[in-house]
Image: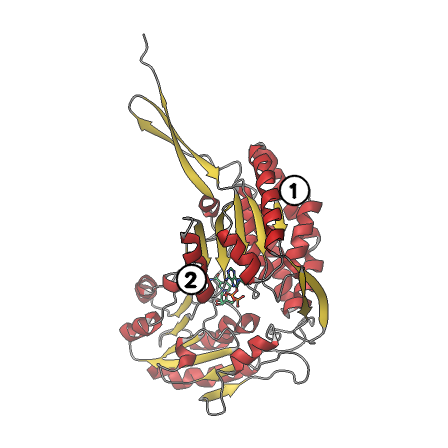
Amino acid sequence: MTSSEVINPATEEVLRTVDLLDVGGVDDAVARAKSAQRTWARLAPAERAAALRSFAAVVDAHIDELAALEVANSGHPIGSAEWEAGHVRDVLQFYSASPERLSGKQIPVAGGLDVTFNEPLGVVGVITPWNFPMTIAAWGFAPALAAGNAVVLKPAEWTPLTSIRLGELAVEAGLPADLFQVLPGRGSVVGERFVTHPDVRKIVFTGSTEVGTRVMAGAAAQVKRVTLELGGKSANIVFDDCDLEKAAATAPYGVFDNAGQDCCARSRILVQRNVYDRFMELLEPAVKGVKVGDPAARDTEMGPLVSKKHWQSVASYVSDDAPVAFRGTAPEGRGYWFAPTVLTPQRTDRTVTEEIFGPVVTVLPFDDEADAVALANDTPYGLSGSIWTENLSRAVRVSRALESGNLSVNSHSSVRYNTPFGGFKQSGLGRELGPDAPLSFTETKNVFFAVQEAP
Ligand code: NAD
């Protein structure tokens, strides 16, 4: 077994050393999960519901601890980290209603009775990225457990701490041993073993499009089910008839939340040409007003980037001759700090076409509605986006024309546990959250019972 150091990105101090599993460790865990799943699926639905409610209650009792861990491990501002821990509780609470509601169908047929059952898949492998470690984990494990499956969860190498703690809290809450196991390790070892292991029946992968493509190709060998939540390069479209002050004041928070390390970041601001100059005048103070600093401080709005390696990747997009319109501020000294940065490049520049995943936004002018839609859709991604307009017909037309899974009009909201979330095109496959998520962790079984005619 190898180990790796977990670093606090705001101080560069080593927080902890975490043991990493090897392939043999994964195989042992999957064997135990397989056995735990059989028992779990046989429990009465109300008992499974009660166990998940108990898990939610234990998470609720540990919100402060989980939030503090995320502040230290990921550099998330304390207010955001508290919201994330509360969101895990809410997701568990929401799906705790599912075991008693996965009711199947009774279908009218000739000669008998026909019913469908929503059978659990078995063991589900959840692979998560480092940007929102505990929330994204919960989107996979909560509906999967609710549908009667066992879950093995591989957190990202840089940010495993809250996931490891959630695994412990599940046991404390009384979930059966081995039903939900958190397995820290390398993507190339633990993640790949999830893909090749015949008893892992589905992979829920959230991460880069590059690795997601590999996961999907590997899963094909066993016709393994996959849900993929991948990258994004979302547009924030600002029309000339909108509340321009509000659009400018909120635009930084639509992209710089979590230091831009957000798959839904509106990292391309598209502004109608006749209001472009005014918008930029309004955007500048809004960007300079973003409070970047100690993530443990209550008034901090943006923390550091997650790691030195990621800092170098983000910095590579802002060379000395980059078309910087203006920048906000960030602390100096230790920590992976990066000031919010606004660029005004050409449409073909790589800052416009590639996912930067940091606090760097590009602003581009457009001519009319058709140009805005074409520009917004000119990307292999299709995850999120915002539309700013006071014209209802335009809002409807543009939201139907955009190739994107999650849009908001006159706001930047993306994620609610009770509405579906996922991407078009290379942003992903399948949907998480919302009322139907547990169904994607089941197989539909159809059974016909022949009924004899009355004598
Ligand atoms: P990544 O693809 O590098 O890693 C994601 C996870 O996959 C990690 O746990 C990693 O260890 C694992 N992994 C790596 N190689 C693997 C392999 N060969 N087989 C199986 N697993 C492997 O992504 P990241 O850098 O951690 O996260 C950032 C990316 O995630 C961004 O592109 C972002 O847009 C995306 N993301 C998408 C969503 C969404 O819901 N669509 C949400 C958050 C992040």
**Residue lying farthest to the bottom in this orientation:** 321
Horizontal side of 8 relative to 452 (left or right) equals right
Work out whether residue 444 or residue 17 is closer to the camera in this orientation and state it.
17
Secondary element at tag 1:
loop
> Which numbered tag is attached to residue 213?
2
Question: Is 82 displayed left or right of 381 in the figure?
Answer: right
At 68% from the left and 50% from the top, the residue drawn is 169
Whether residue 346 is visible to the viewer of this picture, yes or no, is yes
Where does residue 237 sit, x and y in percent of width and height? 38, 73
Q: Quadrant of residue 185?
A: bottom right
The residue drawn where x is 53% and y is 54% is: 193
Q: What residue type is labelled 1?
A: Leu
Residue type at mark 2 is Thr
Residue on which disc 1 sits: 175
Which label's residue is closer to the chain start, 1 or 2?
A: 1
Display colour scheme: secondary structure
- Which quadrant: the N terminus? bottom right
Give the quarter of the figure containing the C terminus.
top left
**Up/down of 293 relative to 387, above or below:** below
In the rendered image, residue 197, in percent from the top left (x then y), is placed at: 51, 49
What distance separates the C-alpha of mark 1 from that of mark 2?
A: 33 Å
Q: Where is residue 249 in the image (x, y as percent from the top left)?
A: 50, 76
